[in-house]
Image (cartoon, rainbow, N blue to C red):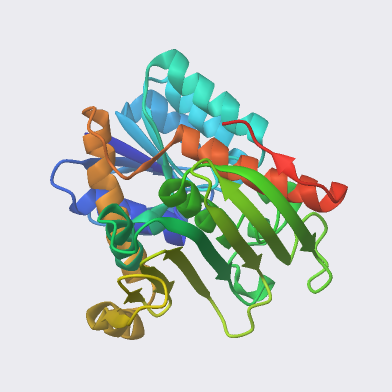
Amino acid sequence: MKIAVFGAGVVGKLRCDTVIKNPDTELVGVADSDQVRAEAAVKGTNAKVTSDYRELLNESKPDAVIISSPVHLHEEMCIDAFNAGCHVLCEKPLASTEESCRRIVAAATEKGLTLAVGFNHRYYPSMQYLAQCLKDGVIGKVDHFRVFGGHDGTGSFREEWMYKGSISGGGAMMDVGIHMTDLVNYLAGDITEVTAVSSGDIWNVEGSEDNAMAIMRTSRNISVIYQATWTEWKGYRIFLEAYGDRGMVRAYYAPMFNLLITHDKPGGKRKRKFKFYPKIILREKLKGWETTTEQTFVEELVDFLRMLNGESVPLADGAAGIRAVQVANAVYQSSRDHATVTLSQ
């Protein structure tokens, strides 16, 4: 499978590394406005380097494209790739608006090509453990979720476009929150009802909220308590907690760990179990968070190839990409109108 990568920043470089290392894929080109960065991403290969991604589509003839560019470029790149006959794996969020997401999905459908979205948090070991607990019914009938994602704000971003709402589509909801939204949709059923408040009085970036807090309901009638924030002064952390009539399970990062509490019935004697990931924690301490991200990209790439073969995999598709942005918009609308927003199923 010949693959080209559009965007050679930190994430794009990791994507390139996974393509290079996979025996079933070949990196044929990288496009980035920074030539030095692009050349570093293809080091040790014969892949073409260019500042114009269209050159790769026309000359390198890839079978598939991985898009790791700024979000405002996603729609044009995706549609050009589909028109060139390429399958696409696009980083989250799929686009900055719901309308743009829908145009991307429509283009893929029209050409009969595959579109996947890089919600790599689905591949975090702690999230996979939680998902397995739900699948196995360990905590019984699920009643509600608590969801949190946050970091300490604009100083955490490598590029300006990442936090400017006019480009990215929003603030904390479209940044760390978009992952948490996808995890809820993936594990608890699509979010169908949103009552929210948001604020942007800390960093004062126009169009980018610092905090979004919501009560949500899903298609499975599961309630969700949700917060996405850029004012988590303790630093980057996310967690997802699922509560049922036979216990609860928490998936946490960073550091990576799980907590499982079970009982035979509400009020019964409880058993508590922790699951730690010392190898991951040590590896990140020595080599950085990128090592965990790269491992999730390795698994996403394998599942992308399986998806192309028609297999059912955990990798997010275009519908998931639309839904996550749709929920973010619902949060903004609910906060603005002081009303509950209902989403179609």
Nearest the viewer among 57 and 35 is 57
* Residue 79 location (% of width, % of height): 51, 25
338 versus 247 height, above or below:
above
Q: Is residue 90 above or below residue 267?
A: above
Nearest the viewer among 265 and 149 is 265
Q: Across the whole image, how many numbered discs are drawn on residues?
A: 0
Q: Toward which corner of the image does residue 272 lie, by quadrant?
A: bottom left
Quarter of the image with the N terminus is top left
Given residues 282 and 326, the one toward you in this image is 326
Classify residue 31 as left or right of residue 3.
Answer: right
Residue 30: image location, x then y, percent: 39, 44
Residue 29 against residue 79 in the figure, above or below = below
Q: Residue at x 51, y 56 (%)?
A: 179
Quadrant occupied by the C terminus: top right
Residue 269, quarter of picture = bottom left
Which residue in the rendered view is the most extreme toward the left? 23
**Res. 160 in view:** yes
Q: Is residue 124 visible?
A: no
At horizontal 42% and vertical 15% (from top left) the residue drawn is 111
Q: Residue at x 47, y 44 (%)?
A: 189
Residue 336 at x, y percent in the picture: 85, 50
In this view, the residue in front, 252 or 321, is 252
* Residue 147 rendering spot, x and y as whole percentages: 54, 64
Q: Residue at x 54, y 28 (%)?
A: 104
